[in-house]
Amino acid sequence: MLAVGLLALIFAALPTATLLFVGMVPTLVAFIVDMTPGRYLARCVAGMNLAGLAPFLHHLWARGHTMTLALDIVTDVFAWFAIYGASALGWLLFLGLPGAVSMFRMLNGKRRTYMLREKQKQLVNEWGDSILPAEAKAAKESAAEPEVRSGAAVALDEAIRAERGRG
């Protein structure tokens, strides 16, 4: 079915097919190279590749849709730079975004842990030792700091310091 569609595109719109064939080579390469289950590399490259190709397709369609104009676009160095540069941005998105997202999620998790520990300290100061987990009670008993606040708050401070040392 795909082959029939491609043949119809070639016969009905040869200039567009020529421009698409030359311009979408990075997507074809990404599709061949990508072995991940969702083919996310191919998706990133295809989207950016089409975005880079769109202005030239519009130029082709607006100026007469001739084979001469299609070949002029294909032989233009700046068109190649724009189309393949957009494809390169798709590769960079695929390579860079997972690391950036995981770093953001890790930092967000650390911030949330810190905020919850602070809230827990407030609750211990307000309610006393009865709401502490067993580990914090054991840490409180071994604490040798002077008691300006409740022992539970001091134990939670130690737990926070220990967690920061691990993180």
Image (tube, rainbow, N blue to C red):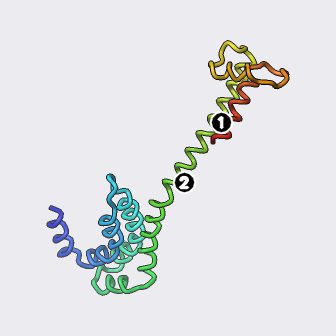
Which is nearer the N-term, disc 1 or disc 2? 2
Per the model, the C-alpha gap separating discs 1 and 2 is 23 Å
Dot 2 corresponds to which residue? 100
> Which residue is depicted at the point 36% across and 86% down?
72
> Which residue is depicted at the point 14% across and 61% down?
1
**In this view, 134 is above or below 161:** above
The reply, left or right, for residue 35 in relation to residue 156 is: left
Given the image, on which type of amino acid does mark 2 rest? Ala
User: In this orientation, which residue lies closer to the viewer: 67 or 85?
Assistant: 85
**Residue 113, position as x, y percentages in the image:** 62, 34
User: In this orientation, which residue lies closer to the viewer: 112 or 147?
Assistant: 147
Q: Residue 163 carries which label?
A: 1
> Which residue is depicted at the point 67% across and 39% down?
164
Given the image, on which type of amino acid does mark 1 rest? Glu
Count of marks placed on residues: 2
**Residue 160, position as x, y percentages in the image:** 69, 33
Q: In which quarter of the image is residue 155?
A: top right
> Dot 2 lies on which element?
helix
Q: Quadrant of residue 151?
A: top right
**In this view, 143 is above or below 61:** above
Badge 2: residue crowd in 10 Å (few <14, some 14–19, many ≥20): few
Residue farthest toward the top in the current orientation of the protein: 130
Badge 1: residue crowd in 10 Å (few <14, some 14–19, many ≥20): few
> Dot 1 lies on which element?
helix
